[in-house]
Image (spheres, helix red, strand yellow):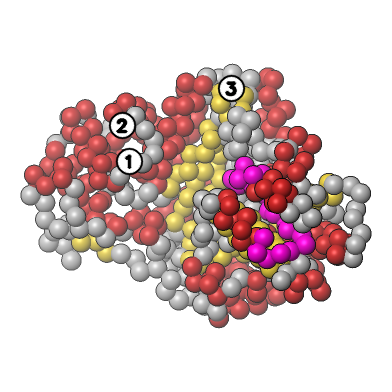
Amino acid sequence: MPDIVLTTLNARYAHAAFGLRYLRANLGELRDRSTIVEFTINDAPLDILDVLLEQNPKIIGVSVSIWNVEPSTKLVADLKRVRPDIVIVLGGPEVSYETDDQEIVRLADYVVTGEGDIAFAELCGSLLAGSRPSEKVIPAPLPDFPSLRLPYDEYLDQDIATRVIYVEASRGCPYRCEFCLSSLEIPVRQAPLEPFLAAMQSLLDRGCRQFKFVDRTFNLNLRVSAAILEFFLERYEPGLFLHFELIPDRLPDPLRAIIARFPPGVLQFEVGVQSFNDEVSHLISRKQDNARLAENFRFLRDETGVHVHADLIVGLPGETVESFAAGFDRLVALRPQEIQVGILKRLRGTPIIRHDAEWGMRYSPHPPYEILQNRLIDFTAMQRLRRFARYWDLVANSGNFVETTPELWAGRSPFAGFMAFCDWLFETEGRKHGIPLTRLVERIHLYLVETLGRDGQEIAELLWRDYQRGGRSDMPMCLRQYGLAPASTRRPQSLGKRQARHGLVPSRPGEE
């Protein structure tokens, strides 16, 4: 039986806990006395408790994040009721700041704040040697990142076959955006390049083809980012998929030249735009060259096969509905495949709270701590924007309505047109979740034909082509009256399901 169990509740099974693997890899001589046991937030609490207690550990380390803090609190409470002798050690972003008022911290024995790769190992060594530190909250000294043992051997073959494999070539962020936890970190530290690439080769040799880089600023160090891209380009095989977070206004010609050589669908760039409002960006200490950003987007969409996922935030201090709408329209014009409309969250420890009084920022006290209203956007308007974000993800980001989505705003502002559809859909359905795809097809057809006066045959043909993008052949009932013939699509073989729907090239009947 292991003395140390590392555990967490992932958002879903496909997400493998990267931090736990770093902790185990750096336990030193205690590594072989440890194990990783993962769950999801949907698992039954008593089943989780049963599995953990079956291990009969002396120490349980729990990784706590914004999405799992509530079920994790219940888990820790039950653990201490049943086995108060087991030492519970917490870590993770949710318990690294503002620990005084957290119930889960009160329940646990110890909390390691910050990057705990080494501090956790030292704490476990002391505990197993019979020495208990007097302080509950243990601030972890910043580890020497280049000297850490890389965690990639901690991924099991089953992980590689079925789960997202997270990797990182750097830690930290040089920017100070006040809504982000990275604004609190020491500037960027790089992993030694050669050992990192050797670890990537090992993952490739084991069959890994999908890599999600968690670096906050992958394209900050151009020498390193170019070397990593060249490494994977030289080893390209169908099925390879690489996800990176990019600084939106930093894409020099040497990096562009490498990116343009990748086959379509291999690269996905998550690009944090957040706001086009210069005054808002100044308020939250964010630096961004919007003209250069726009040029980079045009390059990515016109000259590469990159799948672009862009982020905007609703509720930032100083941002009105009108200025957000203008930014949204501006981003739509740059044609990213996906626009993630995120609602501002008040993450523990972030300096965004300095705007609370002036801008009337009011957040929910419950995870994920989303903004409820502010001085410029009242609760009712914020709710409309929250519905807008949900429906946009359901319709536009899903890739299920690639051709049809622009028809929802034809001839008008994308924001205004899609918001009108959102208001109609919510009034019609009365819900944001649990709308089946076939029902959504029916509703979009009804809205475009009866509310906007579009030609039923034309809209039916668009919807039918879109519907088949996911490999579907069962025609929705509302389209059957239009005598539609099966259409085919040319599917890029390397694309994932969601990216494939965005990337499919429609073929009309008679086209090859």
Marker disc for residue 339: none
Q: Nearer the viewer, mark 2 or mark 3?
A: 2
Cα separation, mark 2 vs mark 1, equals 8 Å
Q: Is residue 57 magenta?
A: yes
Query: Would residue 491 be visible to someone looking at this image?
Result: yes
Residue type, numbered disc 3: Asn
Distance between the alpha carbons at the discs numbered 2 and 3? 28 Å
User: Does residue 246 show up?
Assistant: no
Tell me where residue 345 appears, x and y as whole percent: 60, 36
User: Percent x, y for residue 348?
Assistant: 70, 38
In the rendered image, residue 260, in percent from the top left (x then y), is placed at 47, 64
Q: Which residue is mark 1?
A: 435
Task: Based on the picture, tell me whether residue 189 belongs to the magenta stretch.
Answer: no
Name which residue lies at 58% across and 52% down.
46
Residue that label 2 marks = 429
Residues under numbered marks 2 and 1 in contact, where contact means CB atoms less than 8 Å apart = yes
- Disc 1 or disc 3, which is closer to the eye? 1
Judged from the image, the secondary structure of the residue bearing numbered disc 3 is loop
Say left or right for 179 vs 466.
right
